[in-house]
Amino acid sequence: MEHGGLAAITQDSANPPSTISQSLAKLTELAWRRPPCTAALVMRGIFAWRLVGSSAVPHEGAGQRVGISWEEAAVRDFVAAADARSGVASSDGAVLAGQALLWPGLKGRELVDEVGPGLITALAIPGDAPDSTREFVRGQLAAWLWRPAVADSMFVAYRLAGGNAGMAALQLARIRLATGGPGADTLYYLAAA
């Protein structure tokens, strides 16, 4: 995926369980102190995401729960950061949450239905992520949640923000073909060019 974010986060199974628990406990302490630290929530989510596919298993402790996968823990941390609506870290948390929700390997797609609508709104807040990335993720979430008018406008905004013309045309063609919208065939030809 051309949009960086979670694609750039690699797995790291070299951390022993005690180091994992200590790191999650420290990030949890930082995240929920007064005032809360949104950046620590984002970092805790990134840390959990790095554990996806590792041999580490969540257990009861700060920042982890039995029965909650690392994927879900990461998404929930990113969403909590996005919900804080506290500037750059919240915006970045929303981008990471959206990318994690749309990751093909995510188990439990019902999480998209649960937190996706709030993320579409949270992704409107500017942050460090390029506008094209935020609009692309918003469009994908809206398409997944079957909000075609929102998805269409987000993919147009993605293109206007400097996003890939071919990708924008493909996404718009999909939405417009599904809804009988105008120009779908032409957009497919543009995407293929």
Image (spheres, grey):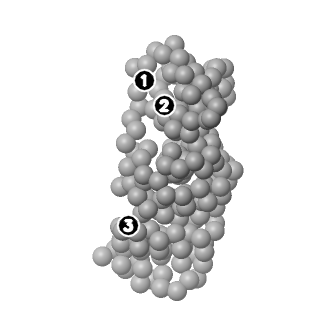
Distance (Cα) linking label 1 and label 3:
34 Å
Secondary element at image label 1: loop
Q: Position of residue 43 (x, y in %)?
A: 49, 34
Q: Position of residue 102 (x, y in %)?
A: 53, 52
Quarter the C terminus occupies: bottom left
Determine the residue positioned at 40% across, 69% down.
Answer: 161
Q: Pointer 3: what residue?
A: 163
Sequence order check, earlier mark of 2 and 1: 1
Mark 3 burial class by Cα count in 10 Å: few <14, some 14-19, many 20+:
many
Q: Pointer 1: what residue?
A: 13
Mark 1 burial class by Cα count in 10 Å: few <14, some 14-19, many 20+:
some
Is the residue 132 above or below the residue 6 in the image?
below
Secondary element at image label 2: helix
Using the rendered image of the protein, determine whether residue 57 is visible from the camera's viewpoint. Answer: no
Distance (Cα) linking label 2 and label 3:
29 Å
Say what amino acid the circle numbered 3 marks. Answer: Gly
State the residue lying farthest toward the bottom.
Answer: 182
Say what amino acid the circle numbered 1 marks. Answer: Ser
Q: Pointer 2: what residue?
A: 47
Residues 130 and 71: in front is 130
